Each structure stands twice: as C-alpha cells, then as structure tokens.
Image: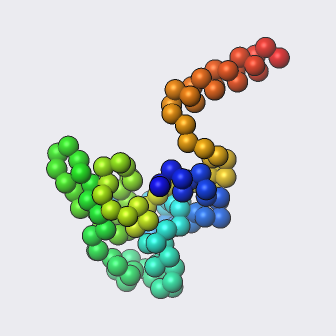
Amino acid sequence: MPSSRIVDAGSDDTVFSPDLFNVGWDNAPHRALKNKTYEMWDAAGRPPIGKRPGEGEIVGTFHLPWGDQKSERYESAMLIPAFDGDPEDVVMWAGLSVDTVNDVKPAGDIVRDLVRETEVALAS
C-alpha cells in the first residue's frame, strides 16, 4: 500500500511541517504524505507538541533483527516492510517530486531503462 500511495499522490497530497512527525527527531522540518495522523492533527487545529491528538499512542511495531520496537504516533521512523500496523498512522516521507512518480519498478528494470535512455541520448 505505501508504494501505491506514492504513485497515486500529487504534491497537494503532501504537507510541510517543522514539527508534525518529530518524535525522535526534533527541529527537522520535513514533508510527508497526508495520512490519518495528519488528518487528526489538522482537524484538531494543528495543536503544538504536547497537545496533539493521540500523542504517545502506540500505532504499530517494527519487527527488527535485534528485537521488536514499538512505534508511536508522530514518530519520525521510516516506514519499512518490518512494520506491523496501519501505514496510514505513521509518517510516509514524500517530497513535491511525488508528481513525477508514475509507477514502481524493480531496481534492475530502472537501471536497464537508464542505460537504454542514455544510449539513445548519446546516439543522437
């Protein structure tokens, strides 16, 4: 689901904030896809840290090789396949370039496309 969210998203589906997903990473302005956590925060009038709805709530677990790690709402963790929970509750980092993402491909296909496109450009 997260990859389809990126493909389907446009820049209007992102939000820039200095402190929305800041648990574990203070003072780091960022852009992310709007999701359930954003909608809760926005509907509450975008309250400051300490007054955000659901603050401190555990929304999932990262199953990592060194052990499970709980994830709380507003945490700055990277959404990875080891996450067990609703991806709409955690940050999905995305910039304005989501406008240019049209599909998801295996890395090998991307490299082959780059080589082919480079060869065409060099030949002309």
Pick the residue in front: 38 or 18.
38
Residue for point 30% across, 58% down: 84
Q: Is residue 48 above or below residue 111?
A: below
Residue 11 as seen in the image, left or right of residue 71: right
- Left or right of 88? Residue 14 is right
Disc count in the image?
Answer: 0
Look at 67% across and 52% down and name the residue there: 99
Q: Quadrant of residue 104?
A: top right
Where the C terminus falls, by quadrant? Answer: top right
Q: Quadrant of residue 77?
A: bottom left
In the image, residue 95 above or below residue 20: above
Q: Furthest-bottom residue in view? A: 44
Q: Is residue 9 left or right of residue 83?
A: right
Colour scheme of the picture: rainbow
Q: Residue furthest right?
A: 124
Measuring from the top left, give residue 42's x and y in whole percent: 51, 79
Frontmost residue, 115 versus 47: 115
Q: Is residue 110 visible?
A: yes
Q: Is residue 109 above or below residue 53?
A: above
Residue occupying the far left of the picture: 67
The residue located at (64%, 46%) in the rendering is 102
Q: Position of residue 10 (x, y in %)?
A: 65, 58
Specify whether residue 90 is in view: no
Instruction: List x then y, in percent, for residue 122.
Output: 76, 16
